[in-house]
Image (cartoon, rainbow, N blue to C red):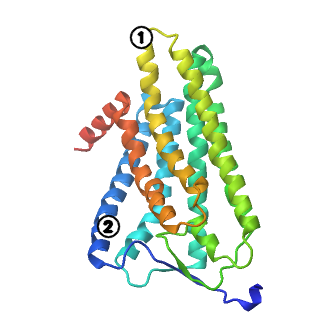
Amino acid sequence: MEIENQTVITEVILLGFSKDLKINIALFLLFLVIYFITIIVNFCIICVITRNPRLHVPMYFFLCNLSFIDICYSSTAVPKMLVDLLSVQRSISNLACGVQLYIVLFMGGTECQLLVLMAYDRYIAICRPLHYQVVMRWSVCHRLTAFVWICSFVIYILPSLSMPMTLCNRDQINHFMCELLAVIKLSCGDIYLNELVIFCISFISLLLPFSFIIISYLCIISSALKIRTGGRSKAFSTCSSHIIVVALYFGTGMVTYFGPSSLYSSNQEKYISIFYVVICPMLNPLIYSMNNREVKKSLRNLFTITN
């Protein structure tokens, strides 16, 4: 059907989770607590890393970037979701929906690339320790980080801007936010090309980075096995947090964008999105702080000074 014969919509209604007020209040309280923990813990990680000179090394510099991404990632979707849980009219303008969609894409993609960079840092530290100070000097770290942000913008935002969608007919999304796979179903006309672009971008942003991380850790494991027992446990402990974060984030992302029903099951998209938009930003700093003695010590000192 031609676009001229269809009703172009100017706002989108987000169906959210439930119409039951009691359920929505319970979800509101749960997500509010999660959001506060996310903001506070990630902000504390940033403060600790910037204030402690001992943590001014590449690994913690990348962790600081990850915490900043998690704050932005969560803040893009969760506040609107909290408002909608207590609202009757859960509408969002096309402009606000587009902004939310682009920011979520950008932050999610940047996190994927940053996790690759963190794996590369661990690879150099364990497999090429004598070259670490040269390979991962500050000028290189800053350039690599800038490259990650710029590359993410080029990969995720430019294709979306070059292929704008006009939304027609249905104005409801079975989701709590403007997520790409949910919004595209409201697009006018044939969406085959859009789906093809989404698949290609997902391949570039998920499978390729994940493959690089797997290769990095295979090399790390091979090198660590040649180290004596004491050094081996230290090498594995520095990588365990990153492995957990990678498994959680890439696992949910691949299920969403490569699952057999990813383009058809809105419920699947919605509930998995909770994990990587709401839960992961909270878990990431907790996982890194619990498994890192330096970060835990610095956090204790920060709260001691505050009190």
Numbered mark located on residue 118 in the image: none
Measuring 48% from the left and 34% from the top, which residue is drawn there?
243
* Residue at horizontal 70 percent and vertical 74 percent from the top: 165
Residue beneath label 1, please?
A: 229
Residue 142 visible: no
Residue at 51%, 16% in the rendered image = 224
Residue 143 in view of the camera: yes
- Image coords of residue 207 (percent x, y): 64, 44
Front-most of residues 174 and 233:
174
Q: Quadrant of residue 143?
A: top right
Q: Amino acid at mark 2?
A: Leu
Q: Nearer the viewer, residue 303 or 240?
A: 240
Check disc 1 and report its element: helix, strand or loop.
helix
The percent position of residue 284, horizontal first and vertical second, equals: 42, 44
Counting from the top left corner in percent of width and height, residue 27 is at: 32, 67
The answer to whether 7 appears left or right of 84 in the picture is right
Residue drawn at 74 percent across, 74 percent down = 190
Provide the residue designation for mark 2: 27
Above or below 180: residue 234:
above
Q: Position of residue 28 (x, y in %)?
A: 32, 68
